[in-house]
Amino acid sequence: CVVFHTRDVLNLAVDAFATQHQLSIRRNTHRSPQLHAKKSELTDWVIAGLEDKNESITSSDPIKAGEGDSLPLNGLAIGKVRIFASESADDDGDNNMQYNDDELIPIRLLAARNGWGSGVHPTTRLCLEWICDNTRDGDILLDYGCGSGILSIASIHMGASRCIGVDVEAEALVTAERNFELNGFSADGRFQGLHTREVLPYEVCPPRGASLCVANILIGQLVRPSMVAAITTNLEDGGLLCLSGIRPGEVDSLKVAYNDSFDWLDEQYAELSATETVGSIESYGFDCGIWARLVGKKRACDDASFVEQMSELAVS
């Protein structure tokens, strides 16, 4: 006869729950998204009037994700994750894809009116690979131009404690929030969505700032003084900045915009073409060319003149 103490029973229950949770993630169990299962935590004025009961910003599909991108039925493997459309068949269904035993973490994405980023564009792939390689336990990610939220979701899986997603498009913030819910992170408060008009110097993640920032945005926005200030002041000293959405020929101009605050990590610079990116040409119908990734480390600088300089840039 075996006697179990109360603590033993509790430990067994906890272990069983943890095991089942990991199996659920690894086997990528099929789920039908409940698009309005919880009230949005976005600021009221950001989402006011965006949709009504007859027209949702997001929808589910077995193949389509992001802004109409087509994903393979067996998912898109990038770094340490595998990206699926929200209604892609699970591995226990009739279409057995034989991916349940690999080590890649599944991420599901809704189709959306506005919510760019599914992994089929070279810049998204460059940023995803960087997130998978550089996120450490407890990191805080500032995801500037978050789109679908794909980079934030990946960072949580890699160990980040929370993410702040910023976007100028309110619909993208809604999409990102719902994708977090779809991937099982709806109730833990690890995603905060902010409109760019809500971003103030030193106020996004006080008191130190985020430990990582990724900004996958076109060069015209990245070099704007207000964006340079918003990113720089909300990243901690020693924090890493990953910039993409740029062409190789635009790298020098981008460096000039951020040179006052960052040392560039040349070993993390990368380029990727559409022809090397699975699903890119199939989704867009044309070759979108070669794109680049630039990574820097923020130098320590907290003197009064720097604070004044950043404050002036923020309103310019």
Image (spheres, helix red, strand yellow):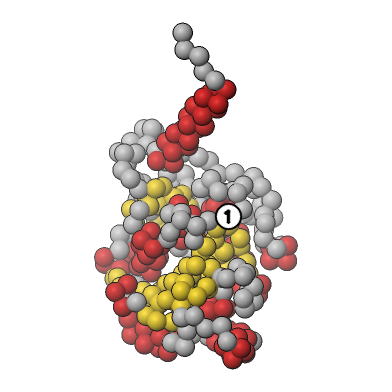
In the displayed structure, would residue 6 be above or below residue 126?
above
| Mark 1 surroundings within 10 Å by alpha-carbon count, few (fewer than 14), some (14 through 19), many (20 or more) | some
Q: Is residue 23 left or right of residue 167?
A: left
87 to the left or right of 187:
left
Q: Residue at x 53, y 53 (%)?
A: 179
- Name the residue at 38% across, 59% down: 132
Residue at 67 percent across and 60 percent down: it is 42
Residue 278: give x, y in percent of width and height.
Answer: 30, 59
Q: Is residue 145 above or below residue 315?
A: above
Q: How many marks?
A: 1
In the picture of the structure, the residue carrying the numbered disc 1 is: 190
Residue at figure coordinates x 31%, y 78% from the top left? 266
- Tell me where residue 304 appears, x and y as whole percent: 61, 88
Res 45 seen here: yes
Q: Nearer the viewer, residue 23 or 175?
A: 23
Identity of the residue furthest to the top in this view: 1
Residue 128 visible to an observer of this rendering:
no
**Residue 7 falls in image quadrant:** top right
Whether residue 70 is situated above or below residue 201 in the rendered picture: above
Q: Is residue 99 left or right of residue 316?
A: left
* In this picture, residue 35 sits left or right of residue 222: right
Q: Quadrant of the C terminus?
A: bottom right
Residue 210 percent across, percent down from the top left: 53, 68
Q: Observer-nearest residue: 49 or 126?
A: 126
Q: Amino acid at mark 1?
A: Arg
Residue 161 in percent (x, y) is at 53, 56
Label 1 SS: loop
